[in-house]
Every structure is written in structure tokens, then in C-alpha cells.
Amino acid sequence: MTQDTDVRGLQSKAEARLAALKQEKLVTRIAVLSTLLGQGKITKRLMIRMSIETHKTSPDFDQERCNQAKNRIMQALGDIDCDVFIEMDR
């Protein structure tokens, strides 16, 4: 399998698993970053951007709600074979 095929497969899998959360507008972006290391080894990272109603520096920011949203994303992804990074929209 080629690096592009691996990346597209991972992207498709993540898109399918997160479709409901994208529809809810909790997940706003899904991207796969891959790095070709020496000896043909490839690392893949799944980058997820989520939307929450307030910025984390706002006085009404709710860390528990943020944690629950991250947990929902990880639960939807299930056992996906790469590192997952979740960032918040500002």
C-alpha cells in the first residue's frame, strides 16, 4: 500500500466514524498528517478540530463540557490505528 492510499483510507475511516459529530457541528475539521521516516516507515497523525461555544479563556468556559466533547470524539473514532490530536476552534 502506498503512503497516499494509507492516508486516504485513514481519512475516510475517520470521516465515516465522525459523520454524526460533524453533522452536530462538534467536529469542524478532520485532517491526516503523515511523515515519511527513514527505512520506509510512515507515521500518521489524525488531527481533529472541534467547536465549543466559548473560548477556553472566557469566564463562562466549561472544562467539563470540553472534556465530554473530546471523549465523544475519541469514542466515535474507536480503535483507530494512529495518534489523535484534538484542537478547539477559537
Image (cartoon, rainbow, N blue to C red):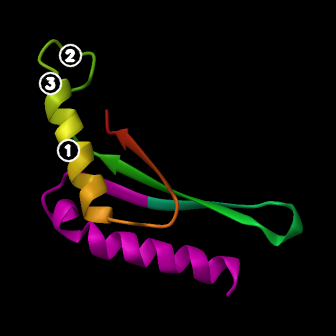
Residue where numbered disc 1 is placed: 69
Dominant secondary structure of the magenta stretch? Answer: helix
Location of residue 87 in the rendering, given as x and y in whole percent from the top left corner: 39, 40
Q: Which residue has dot 3 on it?
A: 62
Numbered disc 1: secondary structure: helix
Type of residue at label 2? Answer: Ser
Instruction: Please report contact status of discs 3 and 1: CB closer than 8 Å, yes or no.
Output: no
Residue at image position (16%, 67%) is: 20
Q: Is residue 88 left or right of residue 51?
A: right
> What element does badge 3 sit on?
loop
Of the 4 image quadrants, the one containing the N terminus is bottom right
| Residue that badge 2 annotates | 58
Is residue 53 shown to the viewer in this render? no
**Amino acid identity at mark 1:** Ala
Q: Nearer the viewer, mark 2 or mark 1?
A: 1
> Looking at numbered disc 3 in the image, what kind of residue is underneath it?
Asp
Highlighted range, magenta? 1-30
**Where is the C terminus found, in terms of image quarters?**
top left
